[in-house]
Image (cartoon, rainbow, N blue to C red):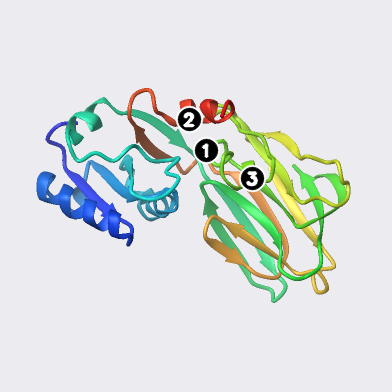
Amino acid sequence: MSGRRIHFTASGAPEAQAALGTLTARYGQARLQEAEVIVALGGDGFMLATLHATGGLAVPVYGMNRGTVGFLMNAYDPEGLEDRLAEATTTVINPLRMRAAGADGTRAEALAINEVSLLRAGPQAAHLRIHVDGRERMHELICDGAMVCTPAGSTAYNYSAHGPIIPVGAAILALTPISAFRPRRWRGALLPITATVRFEVLDPHKRPVAAVADNVEVRDVLWAEVSSDESVAHTLLFDPGHGLEERLIREQFS
């Protein structure tokens, strides 16, 4: 990818801003609309924001870690960037699409690269009914919440809630409860990537629930539907041997 037009973008963190200055001085700064690759400087949260902001451009994104965890990022090194871009491997991921209805009659729609979560929004546990592809699968789940996650997002919130890590090439979604009270031993389900999951909020006025798709939150929802949207694709670039699939496998042995 040597000589290609690179657009650099950075989070507001001091380390990211310093890296932005160093890299643009060395490699130049292409206009976003003319770029052939986007280099995102920050952490995983900034990478998700960059993917959402640039998803309509069909331009691959190469992340360099100037944040904390950096699971979706490559190591930061200002040297030899053009060679690294030329040798990078690609991973294509599809987001989830959330559709939700609020108690005030509003409808909302948003995309999520990692997960869509239903979270209790008050002091009492949420009561949720779960349908998969139009069929009731759980009459009542009493919990702090539940989520549907993509393979790419399976090591994030899903993993902290004891959900499974999913290989990035697997055509699977994970449905994971958060602090399930009843059924107490239910650990969730693995579903085909084509599945549509519908959550219905039981007793929404007494037990309010928020639906969250990455950084988009809808308060006081009555229901939310989640499905994979293969019409939207994000291309990530990784250094050889450090791609997302390798990281997902490695995480299971750490």
- CB of mark 2 within 8 Å of CB of mark 1? no
Q: Secondary structure at mark 1?
A: loop
Q: Is residue 98 left or right of residue 125?
A: left
Where residue 247 is drawn, which disc sits there?
2
The amino acid pointed to by label 2 is Arg
Q: Earlier in the sequence, mark 1 or mark 3?
A: 1
How many C-alpha atoms fall within 10 Å of the one at disc 3: few (<14), some, or many (≥20)? few
Task: Name the residue: 17% across, 55% down.
Answer: 21
Instruction: Name the one closer to the observer, 222 or 1.
Output: 1
Q: Secondary structure at mark 2?
A: helix
Q: Secondary structure at mark 3?
A: helix
Q: CA distance from mark 2 to mark 1?
A: 10 Å
Q: Which residue is mark 3?
A: 160
Q: CA distance from mark 1 to mark 3?
A: 14 Å
Instruction: Name the one closer to the observer, 68 or 112.
Output: 68
Q: Which residue is mark 1?
A: 152
Q: Is residue 82 left or right of residue 57?
A: left
The amino acid pointed to by label 1 is Ala
Residue 29 location (% of width, % of height): 15, 51
How many C-alpha atoms fall within 10 Å of the one at disc 1: few (<14), some, or many (≥20)? many
- Above-or-below relation of 34 to 122: above
